[in-house]
Image (spheres, helix red, strand yellow):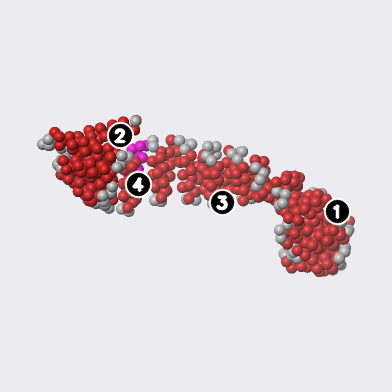
Amino acid sequence: MKKYIAILILIVLSAESFAQQRDEPTALGEEASMKAEMALIEGQKHLILENYAKALEMFHVAREINPNDGAIHFKIAEVLFRNKALTDASESIELAIELDSENKFYYLLAADIYTANSDLASAQKMYEELLKMEGNEDYLVELALIFEYQGKYNKALEIYGKAQEHFGINEAMVLQKQEIYFRLGDPQAAIAEWENLTEAYPDEESYIFSLVELLINQGDLASAEMHLKTLLDKNQKNRRASLMIAEILKNQGRIDEAMDHAQVPLLSPELSFNLKGGILNDFLGQITGESVVKFKTLAQGVAGVHPKEYTAQAFAGDVLYQLGDKPNARVFYVKAIKISPNNFSVWQNILSIESELGMLDSLTAHAEEALEYFPNQAAIYYLGGSGYLMKKDYQQSIQLLEIGKRYASNKRMKSVFNGQLGDAYNGLKNYSKSDAAYEVALSSDDTNEHVLNNYSYFLTLRKTKLDKALEMSTRLIQLRPNTATYLDTHGWVLFVQGKYKEAKKHLQKAASLGNDGTVFEHYGDVLYKLGDQEGALVQWEKAATTNDASDLVHKKIADKKFYE
């Protein structure tokens, strides 16, 4: 019931609007007037219900009764417009205007019909007629748009100017004028329009940011920076302004200044870490020299603002790792795995750093923990096993390495595992298993330098299979002719074989390439064997200043004599 009441109210209101749109009463008789009025009301009812065919039928009935009523032609034009019969709609609205040239609603419908029919010149005339009527300045913007659609940009700008004089400056009109200026190839005029808007609304920050973006796009970074500094003068904690000015400075290569401005938003807990990570990554690609220290401090500060966020801690670890600060990188990696221990690469980085820094207790403990989450990862077994090996816990090392080599995915990796097992079994003096592991390692990769070096050296210490030791050490220095450790091994094999002159050549070269106590001591030993006691003493004394020489070096110096 309520629905019918609502429709009835609409019909009554529509009838009242007809009365406002119609001519002075005609000479029709009372009965004809009533029939025409009822037909109009019935047609309006069907128009509201979107029954356009029936509405048009009733409006035609009204027109036959009273063909000189402009309102009837207006309603016919409206139905035809909705049905997209634009040519017929044009004819009807033109008749309506001819019958009543003072009704603004007729001109508005005519403008819509002409615009829809792409007859922009006629639509322009309708708006121009409307503007001649008193109080119709509201249609200035529509007229400007019509000029713009026709490509009459200067005329459109003129009308927008009049609209601004009447209504005042506003964002919508500025945007329209800005678009025209860009089409005319006059970006400075577009910028000037936006500057006028910011002056009219100095407290509207969004307008200033839009102006800054416009200036940046036009390459006027100095002006953009100036406007942003104005915002920051009002509020030093304006995060968006700080980030935008930081971006401008970064693009100019002013990295330190950029980081100074970025600090406020980056150290704000309100800003998401996802956004911060992107900003830090951009900086990371450009920092050099002294900026590195400032950037590391900033990255650590950001992680501190998000202490419970895994990605923040892991990211800080990655940044510091890339910048060579491995001790601090490890600190953040450890924080990350405490929050979420399910990232293999973070565990691997922790173990690699601890191995490199000689943090053997942490290395083995973390390896055991990591295996709880990644029991099938060969790298963890290798790093953990190597940690136990360096701690001389050979049994535990062998246990991890024997399991881990099952997960080795290629021959080179299997060779690496067996090489470590060879060292571990050698540490237990289980030489048969040690030699077997080394042989398996070389069968997988005969260029494994670690195995070639250690296997040949340990055979030499045992004074067994010296020909094999010499074969391996010879191959080693062929692979790496300028590596001091390998030259020392080869020289020592020759020394044990009694080939002192040949040994001297390699040991002398090894001593010249580094600062290794073992190398200096071995060089002194061969000089002693060749009768150069003074030269031997010099080398032994050099060896004594390092941490790498044997326990016998001081006795050699004191007695000026070689001891095995």
Q: CA distance from mark 4 to mark 1?
A: 80 Å
Above or below, 414 against 113 in this view is: below
What crowding class fits label 1: few (fewer than 14 Cα within 10 Å), some (14-19), or many (20 or more)? some
Where's the N terminus, which quadrant?
top left
**Between 525 and 176, the one nearer to me in the picture:** 176
Which of disc 1 and disc 4 is earlier in sequence?
A: 4
Q: Are marks 4 and 1 in contact (CB under 8 Å)?
A: no
Which residue is under mark 2? 7
Which of disc 2 and disc 1 is earlier in sequence?
A: 2
Residue 78 magenta-highlighted: no
Q: CA distance from mark 1 to mark 2?
A: 101 Å
**What type is the residue that disc 3 sits on?**
Thr
Using residue 1 as the reference point, say whether residue 331 is left or right of it. right
Find numbered disc 3 in the image and state the secondary structure of the residue it sits on.
loop
Q: Residue at x 28, y 32 (%)?
A: 8
Above or below, 443 against 76 in this view is: below
Q: Which mark is residue 428?
A: 1
Which residue is under mark 3? 288
Q: Which mark is residue 191?
A: 4
**What type is the residue that disc 2 sits on?**
Ile
